[in-house]
Amino acid sequence: MRVLKYAILGLLDKGQLSGYDITSKFKEEIGHFWSAKHSQIYPELKKLAEEGFVKYQIVIQGTKLEKKVYSITELGKTELHEWMNQYSPIPETQKDEFMLKAYFVSSMSPEEAKQLFEDQMEKRKQTVAFLEERFQEFEGKEEPVSFFSPDFGHYLVLSRALEREKSYISWLERMIKRIGG
């Protein structure tokens, strides 16, 4: 299944975007739970256009620079809606390089292991600070975010990302105590 296809269709369902804009959305918003590289996005956009799920118009930016601005078609909206109504199983595994290292931690000295875990905790705390800053944008709005808000989906995944990272930090703190060193 081409899940990237649906991620792009979902973004375009919210409004017109260039390939650059889509790449930025992956870095800023979707990157908390799904990743795609620039080199994956543009070929997928081409396929989506060929399949009739998206269309584009060429816009002149500046004096000569052309860029494609994509929008979702009715066929694309139908495809997205059908995918949204499919219930997916929980993935078998999620790749987490740090957890792979944790599994083999007995190959390290306690001091090295503690340093590895502390480094991971510091990175996770930085992520929490970033996520909390983004989350405050929702909390500061006059109208509380509701199901009918255009940013409700972003609110949902941002709140989940915050909980996930805080839980990870809590686990790291307990394991650092256990390692000792």
Image: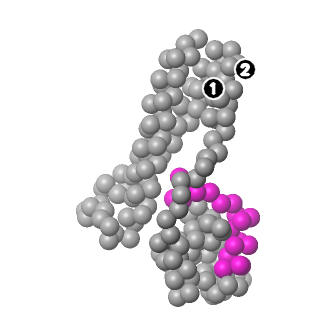
Q: Position of residue 23 (x, y in %)?
A: 62, 65
Per the rendered image, the range of residues in magenta is 29-48
- By secondary structure, the bulk of the magenta-drawn segment is best described as helix
Q: CA distance from mark 1 to mark 2?
A: 12 Å
- Give the image location of residue 174, x and y in percent: 47, 23
Q: Which residue does the numbered mark 1 point to in the structure image?
A: 116
Residue 103 % position (x, y)? 65, 29
CB within 8 Å, label 1 to label 2:
no
Q: Is residue 169 above or below residue 149?
A: above
Corner quadrant of residue 101: top right
Label 2, on which residue?
A: 107
Q: Is residue 56 above or below residue 18?
A: below
Instruction: Indicate the quadrant containing the C terminus: top left, top right, bottom left or bottom right.
Output: top right
- Residue at position x 50%, y 17% in the image: 177
Is 43 in the magenta? yes
Total numbered badges shown on the rendered structure? 2
Could you say where residue 51 lies in the image, as x and y percent from the top left?
67, 84
Choose between 117 and 92: the one closer to the eye: 92
- The residue positioned 63% from the left and 26% from the top of the image is 116
Is 33 part of what is drawn in magenta? yes
Mark 2: few/some/many CA within 10 Å (<14, 14-19, 20+): few
**Front-most of residues 62 and 162:** 162
Amino acid carrying mark 2 in the image: Ser
Q: Quadrant of the N terminus?
A: bottom right
Q: Amino acid at mark 1?
A: Leu
Q: How is the image coloured?
A: one colour
At a point 42% along the width and 44% down the height, the residue shown is 163
* Number of residues whose C-alpha sits closer than 10 Å to that of mark 1, classed few (under 14), some (14–19) or many (20 or more): some
User: Is residue 37 shown left or right of residue 164?
Assistant: right
- Of badges 1 and 2, the one in the foreground is 2
Q: Secondary structure at mark 1?
A: helix
